[in-house]
Amino acid sequence: MKKTSFLALTLLTSLALGSASAQTVIKIASMSPLTGSSSDLGLQIRNATELAIKEQKAAFAKAGFDLQFVAYDDQADPTTGTANARRIAADTSILAMVGTLNSGVVIPSSEVLAPAHVAIVSPANTNPKVTDRGLANMNRICARDDSQGPAGADFLTDTIKAKKVYVLNDKTPYGQGLADAAEARMKSKGVTIAFSEGSDEKSDFSSIITKIKSSGADAIYFGGLYGQVGPFSKQLREAGLSIPVMGGDGYDSPDLLSLAGTGAKDIYFTTVAPPIAAVPGARLIASRYKAAYKKDLAGFGIMGYDSAKVVLAGVMDAIKQSGGKLPPRTAVEAAVRKTNIDKGTLTGAIAFNSAGDRTSAKMFIIQVKPVSGKLDFTTAGTVIVKVAKQ
């Protein structure tokens, strides 16, 4: 009995000493679709965020903190994303979040996280409403639809020389915002809009294709994601229509080829996520990414990595401002908004205006070409987007 009591006391003492010496946990979350039709892009964001966090664990440990990563699957669904946001808000060890992929998810999710002051840095959300609401916790390192849509419209009219365009969107805030911005720019340049409609159809596009055929359109602008655009393009080509299809960065996935097949031709898209070849500093990170996840780093991985770098810089600045102690979420929120990074990112200097928009960002025009069973994403142009400081 005495021996057992002594052992128990020794164990309790060891546990107490261990707890006293344990480092304070700081968690960084990511939220993106990890399952479903857009999971290829969502996993890029998740994995690259984790990679950036692993790189900074030693620096945080030296400062007395155990830096941890937690990933949430929003399934590209606003309801799921909002439920995740409630869980993130309730876990007080989570100081900031990278995400999401879909504007339709981040808009309601950020409103849940705003009262909890959980800072968000988005690698991909392009809808103007994301930052126009004036939330102190919402930031993005990508360009906006009111820049991306017009860039696509300009390419269709100035380079492709389209005269009559059929406009489609996927009925999400992302797709509709993109299509609306492109349509407005095309109208301002005298282009005829054959028809404009939204559709959440995922498999049978025969009725839409029939309307496109009869409209006499010489190009299509489709605001949507690769999971929908791939099957649409396949059926479009099978129906004998070879007119160009233009869209936004939701097309930016190798899975476009498996869904579109030989229909993955004469497709163009604007993207806020750079091709690997356009980022000189991405080679080392790409090799680390491939080693860790057995997949190639792509554009949204680059953006996810840089978003995480901004988050981590903001948290570390808040720690310093708090005298080396665990900072409150409000301090992290303010520090992230004030971020001004000149080095260490893949996409160049990052700073935000008062609304949380990046003051200067690049946008790329990509031509899709199926080559030997793979997709070749060829850069067809680059646009510099600047946002005036407010």
Image (cartoon, grey):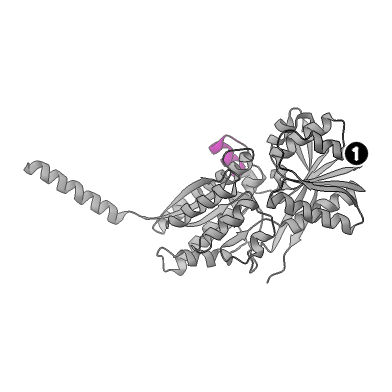
Amino acid identity at mark 1: Ser
Quadrant location of the C terminus?
bottom right
- The residue lying at 28 percent from left, 56 percent from top is 20
User: Quick check: is 294 in the magenta stretch?
Assistant: yes
- The residue lying at 53 percent from left, 58 percent from top is 112
**Main SS category, magenta section:** helix
- Residue 97 falls left or right of residue 141: left
- The residue segment tinted magenta is 285-295
Q: Residues within 10 Å of mark 1 (few under 14, many from 20)?
A: few
Residue 329 against residue 250 in the figure, above or below: below
Q: Is residue 344 visible?
A: no
Q: Secondary structure at mark 1?
A: helix
**Residue furthest toward the bottom?**
390
- Horizontal and vertical percent position of residue 94: 46, 55
Residue pointed to by mark 1: 214
- Horizontal and vertical percent position of residue 131: 65, 62
Residue situated in front as seen by the camera: 196 or 236: 196
| Residue 47 occupies quadrant | top right
- Horizontal and vertical percent position of residue 33: 58, 43
- The residue lying at 19 percent from left, 46 percent from top is 11
- Horizontal and vertical percent position of residue 96: 51, 57
